[in-house]
Image: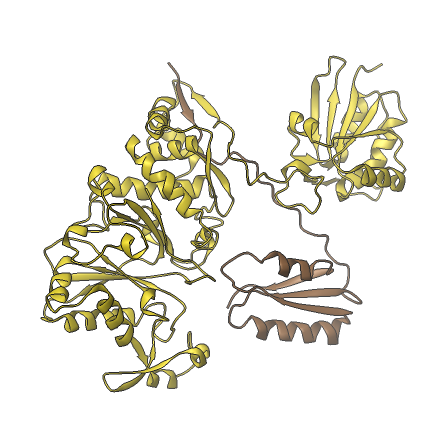
Chain colours: A brown, B yellow
Amino acid sequence: MPITLVSPMNEIAIQAAPPAPRLAGLQGKTIALLDISKPGGSVFLDRVERLLKERYAVANVIREMKPTFAKPAPPGVIEKIRGADAVIEALAD
Amino acid sequence: MSNLSLLAILQTDCPTCRLITPYLNALADGPAQVRGVSQDSEDATREFVHQMGVRFAVERDGDFALSKRLGVVTVPTLYLIDDQERVVRQEPGFDKTALNEIAALLGHAPVATPYDGAPQSKPGCTSRHLEVQTEHASAAALNLHATRGAAASTVDLADSEDPHEYCFRVFKDPLPVVPPTRERVDRMLRAAGRDPHEVIARIPPCYGEATVEKIAANAVMAGCVPEMMRVLIPLMRAIADERFNAHGVQATTHFAAPLIIVNGPVRSELNFHSRQNVFSNVARANSTLGRALQLILLNLGGARPDSIDMSALGNPGKFSYCIAENEEENPWEPLHVDQGLSREQSAVTLFAAEPPHGVSEHNARTARGVLKSISYALATMWNYRACMGFEAVVALGPEHVHTIHRDGFTKQNVRDFLFENTGVPLRCYNDEPGEGVAARGMYKEIMIDGERCYQKFRAPESIKIVVTGGTAGKFSAVLGSWSAGPRGSQMVTYPI
C-alpha cells in the first residue's frame, strides 16, 4: 500500500529574472546610484559618482535613496531610476 | 519526408528569441512547417516580425493558454510536434547542437555552424506568464488578490522508500518531520473546517500561497494537533501583515526571528505552557506551533537559511520560538490587552526578536532594585551606544513581578521606569567611532542617577512587558528587536 504525501512546498514557479545586458562602456551613459539608506552608503556613492564623471565621462548620474533598508524599494524610487543605462546599489554599512 | 512540424514560443524583447529567429527562418525555408507563437501584444509582435524579417507565420498567445498548456518555462522553447499533435521533443533556450538535431529530424540540412558569430548556446528568458513583475498589462502578473489557490500536489511513495528519508531529501529541513500523509493532512483540514484551497495569506519573501491545505501539510510535519489550525490561520494573517514586515525579517543579516506570544483562553484549551522553561522544549503546543511557523516560512515563504535568509549568526529561535504569557501570575493587564483586545479574547502576537538575554537578580528587595537590573541589560540592546532604532520585549519572571507589584507599580509604571532609567552615559561617546555614535545628534539627553546619558528608547511603548516563566527563581529576560517601527518591523497581534 503506497503512502501518499501532500506537498508542503510553494508550487508557484519562481523564475530568476535574467540580468540586464552588460554595458560595453560607460561614456555618455546615464548611471543611477541607489543608496539603501544604510550608514556609509552615501560616502561610497559620492566617491563612485566622482569617479564615474571624472574617469569614465558618464553623461548623467541619478541619485536615489530608499526610505529604509528594511523594505523593498517603493515604486516611486524604482520609477525615478527607470531608464538609466545601469544601476549601482550601495548595499550595506 | 518528415511528418513533424516545429512550434517556437517567442517573446519580442527576449535577446535569445532574437538570436534564434534567423535559424528558424532557415528551417522555414525547408520542407517542414515552422510556426511561431508570440507572448506579446499585436503591435509588438508585428514590429518584431518586421524587424527580424520573419519568414514563418507568427500567431499570438494573448491569454497564455498555449504557454500554460505546454508548461513553457523559458522562451524561446522549440516544440517538435507530430501529425497526432503530440510533442515529441522540446528544447528551451538557444543551442546549436539541438538546432541541428531538430533540423535533421525535420529533413533539413544543418542550420547552425560553429563560427557563424552566434554563441554555441544561450539561456532564454522567463516565460511571460511566469513573470512576477511586468510593466505591461498584456502580461499575466501573479494574481495577488486571488482568494482560492491550487490543490497541493501529491506523491505516492514506493514501498521501498522510507517516508522520513524522503522528507529529508525533498523538503530539506535538517530536523525530522512527521510525513504529511494524505490522511494526516485531511484530519487537519477537517479540524480547520474551511475550504482547503482558500488562500489565507501569501508568505514573504517569495509570497508562496498559504492555502489551508498547505498550512495543514506543514502543521502535520511540525507535529501539531489538528485543533492547532484555529491558531495557525490567524498566525498566517499576522505573519503576512505588512506592519510586521516578514519580507525584511526573513531576509535580514540580523539575528531576528519571529517570536510568537500566545494569550487568552486558547492557552489552556490547547495546552500552551507559560511556566517554567517557557522558552524551551516544555510543551507540544508551544514547540509545534513555533516549528509550524518556521516550516511555513521556509517551505512557502522561501527564506531558506542557506540562501535568502542571510542572517550572519542566525537564531536558535528559528527552530521554534513560541511562548505563552503566564496571565495567572500577572497582576496587570496581559500583552494582548495592551495591544487593544479584551482579556477574554485569545490572541497571537508576533515580535521580530533576538534570542532571550537573561537577567538574574536574586538579591534586590524592591521594584526599583529589580528594574534597575533589567535597565542595565536593556542598555546594551543592539549595541551599547545605539539608541532609539529598536524595541524590546521584557519577559518578567513571576518572582520579579511579585516584588515589583508589592511596591505598588502598575504596568505603565514599569514601562515608564525602564524608559527613564535606561540610557547610555555621554562619556561612552568620547571613545573612538562605532555603531550608534554618528546618530547621537538625534538622541535625547537625560539624567540617570546624576549622570548625563542618552535615552536608550524612543518611547515607553517601545518596551513591551510580558509576564512568563516559572514561579521559582528570580529571573527575567530581555529580548531585543530588529529595526523597529514603520521603517522596520512592528509588533502585531491577531485575535484567534
Q: Position of residue B468 (x, y in %)?
A: 20, 54
In the rendered image, the vertical position of residue B278 relative to residue B460, given as above or below: above
Image check: B359 left or right of A56? left
- Answer with the quarter of the image where residue B218 lies: top left
- Answer with the quarter of the image where residue B413 lies: bottom left
Is residue B403 visible to us here?
yes
Q: Position of residue B388 (x, y in %)?
A: 39, 71
Q: Position of residue B62 (x, y in %)?
A: 73, 32
Q: Position of residue B60 (x, y in %)?
A: 78, 31
Foreground pick, B134 / B166: B134
In the rendered image, the vertical position of residue B236 relative to residue B365, given as above or below: above
In the rendered image, the vertical position of residue A18 relative to residue B179, given as above or below: below
In the rendered image, the vertical position of residue B126 relative to residue B334, given as above or below: above
Q: Which quadrant would the N terminus of chain B be assigned to in this image?
A: top right
Is residue B176 visible to us here?
no
Image check: B40 left or right of B441? right
Image check: A76 left or right of B479? right
Q: How many marks?
A: 0
Q: Which quadrant would the C terminus of chain B be assigned to in this image?
A: top left
Question: Residue at point 45% right, 48% down?
Answer: B306
Foreground pick, B68 / B366: B366
Question: Residue at point 57% right, 40% down?
Answer: A14
Foreground pick, B152 / B444: B444
